[in-house]
Amino acid sequence: MSFNQTSVDWTAGKVTRAIKKRFENLFKPILKFLTISFIAVFLLIVYVQKVEILWMEVVQVPLMLPHLSPELEGYRIVQITDIHADDWMTADRIANITRQINDQQPDLVVLTGDFVTGDADRYSPALKSFAQLKAPDGSIAILGNHDEATDPQLITNVLESSGVRVLQNQVVTITSKGAPLNIAGLGDAWSGKDDMEKVLQQLPGIGASILLAHEPDVADRTAETKKFDLQLSGHSHGGQVSLPFIKLVTPPLAHKYPLGQYQIADLIQYTSRGVGTSGIRVRFNCRPEITVLTLHAPTPESTNIL
């Protein structure tokens, strides 16, 4: 081999090594980025499907109700909503939620609808776990749009046989320590089963009044009546996925009051994130919620402020 040929081969090899090193320097960061991204996406999927969806938050909500009798100072209501019994939200999971509710030592438990996602024949038996609820003043429920879309009577029967009273445009007055507390249950608004006028006709003229309404956005209508201190709702699931700087995606009748506490004229509205899911079985930055509402009676100082 001639000197010139050797020189050419050496130069070609040097160029090849340089090109290879350049490609390695270029693709190593890209490969590293793709690997990290894949791991991050995998962990995020695991988190939203396996971790947060089970990570129950007990939310403490102190509320002063203007018409609450002093005898009911410190009265505790535990609210859950949007159970959505299905292949995932099984009787065992509901039994575990029931135990967590009992741990809060409620005076009253309220359940604000959507007990099943669909197929009540198959999934409503799981609701029998609510027979283990323990509260001195019992458990009261209303139905949601998913319940009305399947078999509302079957769901009602299962709940009532488990000791949960279901209200459909009805009012029940609880007497605790000699003082009245009115709990009204509005029929599902999305399904056209709501009858506010019928509710108002049954409402006593004394005591604090609380309305259970599955869809939160009926609160404007509730406030207009000037008859209720508090409305408790669900339906929105808090959006299930809450991303920074992005508006929550919520169903109809849950756009205006989708999450947490609001003040609408003299009415307090509270919308719970719920305990189940529907549509997609994920939660992100929106943990399932058991709400503990501790009621406080007005004091002379607060009355003067009002």
Image: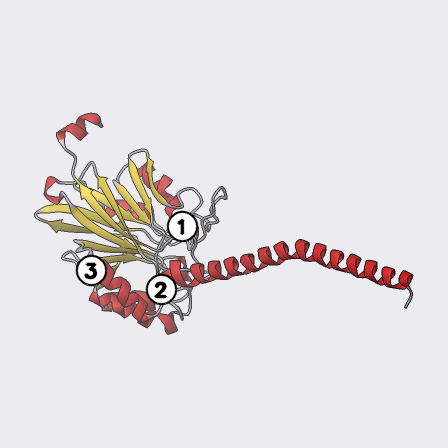
229 sits left or right of 235 in the view: left
- Badge 2 amino acid: Pro
Which residue in the structure is indicated by mark 3? 102
Q: Badge 2: few (under 14), some or many (20 or more) residues near its Cα, within 10 Å?
A: some
213 sits left or right of 138 in the view: right
> Which is more N-terminal, label 2 or label 1?
2
Q: Which mark is residue 145?
A: none
Instruction: Indicate the secondary structure of the residue bearing disc 1.
Output: helix
Q: Is residue 69 above or below residue 105?
A: above
Q: Badge 1: few (under 14), some or many (20 or more) residues near its Cα, within 10 Å?
A: many
Q: Which quarter of the rendered picture does the C terminus lie within?
A: top left
Instruction: Indicate the secondary structure of the residue bearing disc 2.
Output: helix
Q: Quadrant of residue 143?
A: bottom left
Q: Quadrant of residue 114?
A: bottom left
Q: Is residue 261 above or below residue 84?
A: above
Observer able to see residue 157: no
Q: Where's residue 81, x and y in %?
A: 33, 56
Camera-near label (1 vs 2) is 1
Observer able to see residue 175: yes
